[in-house]
Amino acid sequence: AQSVTQLGSHVSVSEGALVLLRCNYSSSVPPYLFWYVQYPNQGLQLLLKYTSAATLVKGINGFEAEFKKSETSFHLTKPSAHMSDAAEYFCAVTQPFKAAGNKLTFGGGTRVLVKP
Amino acid sequence: EAGVTQFPSHSVIEKGQTVTLRCDPISGHDNLYWYRRVMGKEIKFLLHFVKESKQDESGMPNNRFLAERTGGTYSTLKVQPAELEDSGVYFCASSQDRQGNGYTFGSGTRLTVV
């Protein structure tokens, strides 16, 4: 079984400030973890993914996330928010190499508002 | 490389009517997934095709939903008859492998049942 919890359905940050989005997961096997972003009126775009290599993962648009097994966390950060970061962000988990085919389980999403 | 294409992008239908959503995956991607997000809830898995075969349909809500992938290319998801609670955004994704290395999502179909 697998599940994802994203703390905070809405986050407001000032332009130039740190963006921190929290994600905790549970998985019965070592997971693969993903962050997706959805801009208004668009589909889900992959930001970054952890697939058991380096625990610090760098993604697009200056985002990065760190896999911490002891904390079962995969928090997403960006040092300096830009207005274009306003979007909804989703954390997701899958259990690789499972016969069932690696369906994703998503968190509830965090909507980010960037204030000028 | 073309991405995952879904249409229509929006659909508004009356309760009791039938709607068919279509997904064209990336060429060569054997794995095709359907997900759904109803208002205020998480994105939930519906089903997974490997080529034309249903690998996992554990997320299908009830027998009003029918998914097909004839010939292992595009897929359709039919809702018949539609109910108010079926409203939401339906996403399709495709991937080349089954190890979870990467999924490409379509832009989704926003379905509104009135």
Image: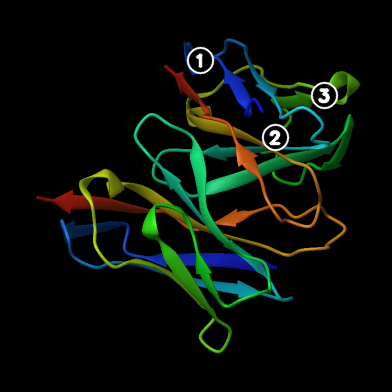
Q: Indicate the position of residue A25 as horizontal and vertical percent values.
A: 55, 72
**Alpha-carbon span between mark 1 and mark 2:** 16 Å
Dot 2 crowding, Cα within 10 Å, few <14, some 14–19, many 20+:
few
Q: Against A12, is B21 above or below?
A: above
Q: Is residue A34 visible?
A: no
Q: Quadrant of residue B17?
A: top right
Question: Tag 2 or tag 3, which sits nearer the N-term?
Answer: 2
Q: Quadrant of residue A104?
A: bottom right
Q: SS of the residue at dot 2?
A: loop
Disc 3 designates what residue? B69
Q: SS of the residue at dot 1?
A: loop
A103 sits left or right of B54 in the view: left
Mark 1, mark 3: which one is toward the viewer?
3
Q: Do tags 3 and 2 sit on the same chain?
A: yes
Question: Tag 2 or tag 1, which sits nearer the N-term?
Answer: 1
Q: Against B93, is A110 above or below?
A: below
Dot 3 crowding, Cα within 10 Å, few <14, some 14–19, many 20+:
many
Q: Amino acid at mark 1?
A: Lys
Q: Against B48, is B3 above or below?
A: above
Name the chain letter of the residue that bears numbered label 3: B
> What quarter of the picture does the N terminus of chain B occupy?
top right
Name the chain letter of the residue that bears numbered label 1: B
Q: Are marks 1 and 3 in contact (CB under 8 Å)?
A: no
- Considering depth in this image, is B65 or B89 the residue closer to the camera? B89
Q: Indicate the position of residue B41 as horizontal and vertical percent values.
A: 45, 47
Q: Are marks 1 and 2 in contact (CB under 8 Å)?
A: no
Q: Indicate the position of residue A11 as horizontal and vertical percent values.
A: 24, 59
